[in-house]
Structures are given as C-alpha cells and as structure tokens.
Amino acid sequence: MAKFDGVKEAKKLYERLFDADRVIWTGQYVTDLEKVLDDLDIGVIRADFSKEFNNIDRIRNNNVSGFLFKNKGKHTIFMNTNTSESAKRQRFTLAHEIGHFCLGHSEDNDTYFRPRDINSSSGKDEYEVSANAFAAELLVPEKLIKNLYEVGQSTKLLSEIFNVSEDVIKHRIKNLELR
Ligand SMILES: [Zn+2]
C-alpha cells in the first residue's frame, strides 16, 4: 500500500468499483460514495458535533466538518450536520476521510479530523495532502475530466457534472495541467 500516494490508491479503487468507459457512455459522472462506503464496510454517522462531541477539545476548538474513527478494527466516518458547508463540500470531506482509510492511515492514528477551514489543515502534512489528492481523484477522475475539458466544458458546468465545488475543479485543471 502506498501510504501517501493518494492518486494511485484512488485510481485503484475507482477501477475496481466503477467502469470509466461506461460512465462516459452513460454520462453518469458523479462518483457513488455510498457504493464505496458499502464496499469498504465503512459506517457513516451524521451528528451535530456541537451537541454530541463538545467534550472533545479538538472538535470544539477546530470546527471540525468530519472525522474518521477506528474502534476495534471497525471504521466509521462521523459527519457534522451542524454546518453551513454545501453538500458538495461535505462530499469532499467524506471522500477525504475514505482516503485516510484506503491509504492505511488508521494504522498510525485512530482518528483523523478534518477542520472546517481546510486551509488550517497544514498544506505540508502528508497525511492530509495525500487524503486530499485521493478525494480529488476519486470524485473527479483524471480520465473523465480530461475527456470533458477537451470538449470545452466550463468549470461551473464541470462542478455540476461531478457534484464537487468549483474550487475542486479549478485545482484539478491546474494540477493536471489541462491548460
Ligand atoms: Zn484529513
């Protein structure tokens, strides 16, 4: 397992569960995260963190939007329902936490918190950087965005097609050097 190669692990997972050619053919570009969670046997619990977890310092102080938690070998992703974040941002958080799981990060720590202010999670922390790379590739696979970008779709339309924020699309275009 490549612990910090988010792109590689995301591609491996995507290829195992989905068929990119079929996706292009049908036009159903939104990655089905429920299918991913089912396959990996990861539970999801949605809760108001301000009520449920206000005894945990890290959550109270950091405005956490979600976290991965390992207990007795079973993984659960907790998602904060007390949030002004868009559904698109929450989807990215979910994919990011799936990334910590797939990259084997839970072997090193039992819990990975994702702060609401993404910029506050250090850009140098390789756990966070690789989980972000994983989420970006899982939600917006390189092969698919290339295909659409080449035919001239706007970032706004691409964000709707993949059900991610426009920021994620802009990062993808930049990182994949599509322009
Ligand atoms: Zn994280």
Image (cartoon, grey):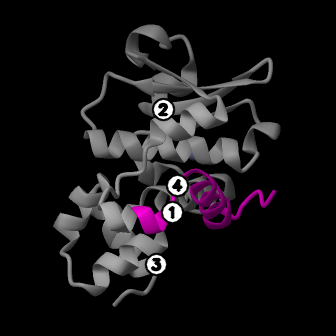
Q: Nearer the viewer, residue 22 or 141?
A: 22
Q: In terms of sequence position, does the residue under pointer 1 or pointer 2 come before the other?
A: 2
Q: In terms of sequence position, does the residue under pointer 2 or pointer 4 come before the other?
A: 4
Q: Nearer the viewer, residue 128 or 135?
A: 135
- Label 1 and label 3: CA atoms lie apart by 11 Å
Q: Amino acid at mark 4?
A: Phe
Q: Is residue 94 above or below residue 126?
A: above
Q: Is residue 35 left or right of residue 81?
A: right
Q: In terms of sequence position, does the residue under pointer 3 or pointer 4 come before the other?
A: 4
- Label 3 and label 4: CA atoms lie apart by 23 Å
The residue identified by callout 2 is 66
The residue identified by callout 1 is 137
Q: Quadrant of residue 40?
A: top right
Secondary element at image label 4: loop
The residue identified by callout 3 is 175
Q: Is residue 74 above or below residue 128?
A: above
Q: Which mark is residue 18?
A: 4
Q: Amino acid at mark 2?
A: Gly
Specify whether residue 5 is painted magenta. Answer: yes
* Mark 2 and mark 3 residues within 8 Å of each other at the beta carbon: no
Residue 55 spot, x, y in % from top left: 54, 10
Q: In terms of sequence position, does the residue under pointer 2 or pointer 3 come before the other?
A: 2
Q: Amino acid at mark 1?
A: Glu
Could you tell me which residue is drawn at 64 percent across and 61 percent down?
6
Q: Is residue 54 left or right of residue 111?
A: left
| Part of the protein shown in magenta | 1-22
